[in-house]
Amino acid sequence: MKKKRIKPYILDGAMGTELIRRSVNLPLPLWSGDANLTHPETVIQIHQDYVNAGADILTTNTFRTTPRTYLKSGFSDTDSTKRALKSLNAAVSLARRAGRKEYTIIAGSIAPLEDCYSPELFPGYTTAENEFVQLSEWLENAGVDVLLFETMGCLQEIKAAISASSTINIPRWVSLILKDKDHLLDGSDLKNAIKYLAKNNIDIILINCTLISILDHALKVLNEMWSGSWGVYPNTGVSMPSKDGHITEMVSDNEFSSAIKGYADMGANVVGACCGSTPKTIQLIQNTLENESI
C-alpha cells in the first residue's frame, strides 16, 4: 500500500507576465514594481485568481519594488525611497486582502538588486547588505508572514541577504536560480550554496525560475545535503524567458503535471510555478496533487 504523504503547500504563479496578459504596460526597469499603485485592482484580482485556483501562498508584488529601481526610473533619492515604500506597503496589503485570512501565507518577495538573469551586475557585498536590511525591515513591518529571497543566482548576494536579515523575527526562505544542474547562475557550486544556507538558520530552501529539464538532479543534490523543508517552482517554458518575461515555447500540461507529481513524490513541502505561469497553471498543480490523493 502506498504510504500517505502530506500535501505540499501550493505557491502562486507569475505576476509580471500575468499583468502584461491583462493589458498592463510594464516598462523596464520598474517592470511590475509600480503596478501596486497604478493598477491595484488588477494586482488584487490576480492574487484572488491564484487563491481560487488553489494557492496556499501568495507572493507580494515586490520583485522590483526597491529604491534602486525607482532611482533608475528617474525618481530622486528621496522620492525613490518614498515611492518604493508606498508601493511595497500597498503590495502587502493587496496580497493580504486577496488571501483567505487564517489560511493564506503571505511571502514577502525580495529579488536580486539588479537584473536577476545577470549576476555579474551584483553591486557589491556592503551595498547589497545595506539595501537588503532596508527591504527586509520594510516587509517585516508591513506584516508579511515570511521573507522570500527568490531567484537568487549569485552566492555573494545570497550571503549579503542572509546577513542583512539575520535579526528578522519571521521565517526566511531562500530560492535559488540555476545555470545548469550543478551551478547557480553565477557559476557557484550548488553544493556550496546549500552548505552555506544550511549553516545559517534558513527555514526553507527552494529552487525557482529554472527549467524542468535540469531540476531532478539538482533536487536530488538538495535532498542529499539538506534535511529541512524544501520547495520548487519551475518555469513553464522549454527554454528560459527573455528579460521582459516572454517565453517562446511552453512545456505541455502533461509534462508539467508529471514534474509536479515527481516533486511531491520526492517530499517537496512547497510547489508552484514561475515564469509563464497563470492561474490555470496553479489549478493544474492543485488538480495533480488532488488526483494523487496526497
Image: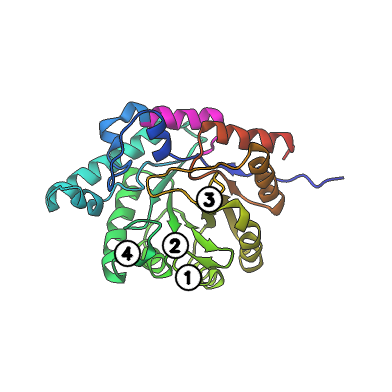
Question: In front: mark 1 or mark 2?
Answer: 1
* Front disc: 3 or 2: 3
The residue drawn where x is 30% and y is 35% is: 36
- Dominant SS of magenta comes to helix
> CA–CA distance between discs 4 and 1?
14 Å
Q: Nearer the viewer, mark 3 or mark 1?
A: 3
Amino acid marked by disc 4: Leu
Q: Is residue 248 visible?
A: yes
Q: CA distance from mark 3 to mark 1?
A: 19 Å
Q: Is residue 2 left or right of residue 19?
A: right
Residue shown at the point (40%, 48%) measured from the top left: 109
Is 130 positioned to the left or the right of 260 in the image? left
Badge 4 is on which residue? 121
Residue 239: image tag: 3
**Element carrying mark 2:** loop
Earlier residue among tags 3 and 1 = 1
Instruction: Report helix, strand or loop for mark 4.
Output: helix
Q: Nearer the viewer, mark 2 or mark 4?
A: 4
Q: Position of residue 114 (x, y in %)?
A: 32, 58
Q: Which residue is mark 1?
A: 187
Q: Secondary structure at mark 3?
A: loop
Q: CA distance from mark 3 to mark 2?
A: 17 Å
Dot 1 falls on a residue whose secondary structure is: loop
